[in-house]
Amino acid sequence: MTCRVGYRGMDENDQFSSMVLVELGIPPGFNVVSSDLMEAQTQRGIRKFSLTPSKAIVYLDGLAPGRPARRQERAVMLSGVFAPMVTAFDAEGRLDLESNERIVEHLIAGGVDGILFFGSTGEFFALTLAEKKELTRFAVEAVGGRAAVLVGTGGTVVDEVVELTRYAQQAGADAAVVISPYYFQLDQESLYRYFAEVAGRVELPILLYNFPDRTAVNLSPELVLRLGRDFDSVRGIKDTVDNISHTREVIATVKPKMSDFAVLSGFDEYLVPNLLAGGDGVIGGLCNIVPSLHVAIYEAFRRGDLATVGELQKRINVLMGLYGVSQPFVGAIKAAVSLVVEGVSPACRAPAGELTDQQFEAIREILAQAGVLD
C-alpha cells in the first residue's frame, strides 16, 4: 500500500497550499483516513506525519484531498502544568518573535507540559486576527513538538473563532482554548448554543475557558458536562474561578461520566487543591516567571511528597502578590518575566500602561522574597 506525501506551506495570500512530492510505503496496520489534517489511523491510535518546518500531508491514492478527518478517540493529553505565555512586543509595539522565542525556550527548559498562546496573560484582546495567525505559525515551529501548543481562539464573533481554530489546527496546534462570549450576561442555554456552534464546526480539541471575573458569566458544571458529552472536540476546561468549590463541583459532576475530560485551574495557587479534588493541573500566569516551580509542585504531589509540596506552595503564595501590583495584572507578570528572561521588554499594549518605578520595585521585592532574584 502506498500513499502520496506532500509539503504544506503558505502561499502569498497566507493560505495553506500543498503539492505532491514523494510516494511513501505504509506499514501493515496503517490506514490513512485524512489528507487535510495530516493524520493516519493505526490500531494504537492517531499518528501524525510531519516534516518540519513544513507539514506533511498524507493520503491514499484515489482519496481526494480535503476529506475531513475522523477522530475516533480522545488522543490529546491535557494534564500537568501549562504556561499561558506573555506576548512580547518590541519598542514600537510590534510582535517581537525573537523575544517570544526566548520565552518559549525559558518555559520548555522549566519543564512545562504545554504553552497557551493568546490567553488573558498573552493579551489576546489586543492582537489582530492576522497577528494571531502569524504567532500561531511561529508557536508551532518554535515549540517543535517539545510541549503541547494551545491557542486561545475565543472571541465574540463566532466566524472568527472558527476561522482561527481551523487555522490553528492546520498549523499543527494541539488544542484551542475558547473563552465564553463576553459583554452580555448570557444564560446557560445561550452559552451552550455559542459553544455548540464553535464545536460543531471544528475538529481541533477544545478547552472551554471559564473566567467569570472577565466575562460576567459562569459555566455551570452541568453545562460543562453537557458540552463534553455532546461534542467530541470538547476535551476539557480552564476554570479560572477564585473559588475552588466551583472547580471541585465541575470535577465531581464531569469526571465520573468522562474520566478523560481535563479540568485545569486558572489560578496558580489552586494547583494543589485542584489535584486533591481529582483535577488535572493548572494553566497559571506565574509559570511564565519560574515554570520549574509549578512543575516541581506537580511532580512532588504525584509522588506523594507532601512536605515538599507545602514548602514550594509557600513560594507560590508569595508570587501571587504580583497580581495586585498592576491593573490589568498582565503588566506586572510581563515585567517580572523581563527581569528573569534576558532581552524581553515589559511593554504591554493598551489598555495596560507603563509601570512606575515604584511598581517595578514592588515586583523585584516579591521576586526576591520568593527566591527568584537575589
Image: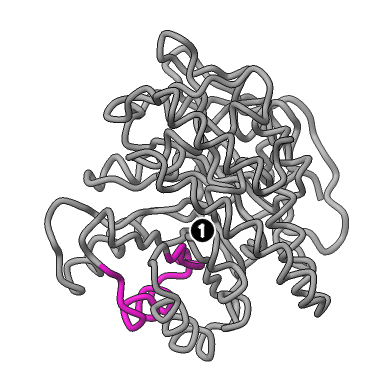
Q: In this picture, is 374 found above or below 97? A: below
In the rendered image of this protein, does residue 84 appear above or below residue 105?
below
| Residue 166 in sight | no
Residue drawn at x 33%, y 83% is 222
Reading the image, the residue beneath label 1 is: 205
The stretch of residues the image draws in magenta is: 218-239
Q: Quadrant of residue 268?
A: bottom right
Q: Position of residue 200 (x, y in %)?
A: 35, 61
Residue 141 at x, y percent in the picture:
67, 30
Residue shown at the point (13%, 62%) measured from the top left = 185
Residue 70 falls within the magenta-colored stretch: no
Left or right, 79 with reference to 122: right
- Three-letter amino acid code of the residue under disc 1: Pro
Neighbourhood count class around disc 1 (C-alpha, 10 Å): few under 14, some 14–19, many 20 upward: many
In the current view of this chain or complex, which residue is farthest to the left? 184
> Going 45% across and 39% down the picture, which residue do you hit?
118
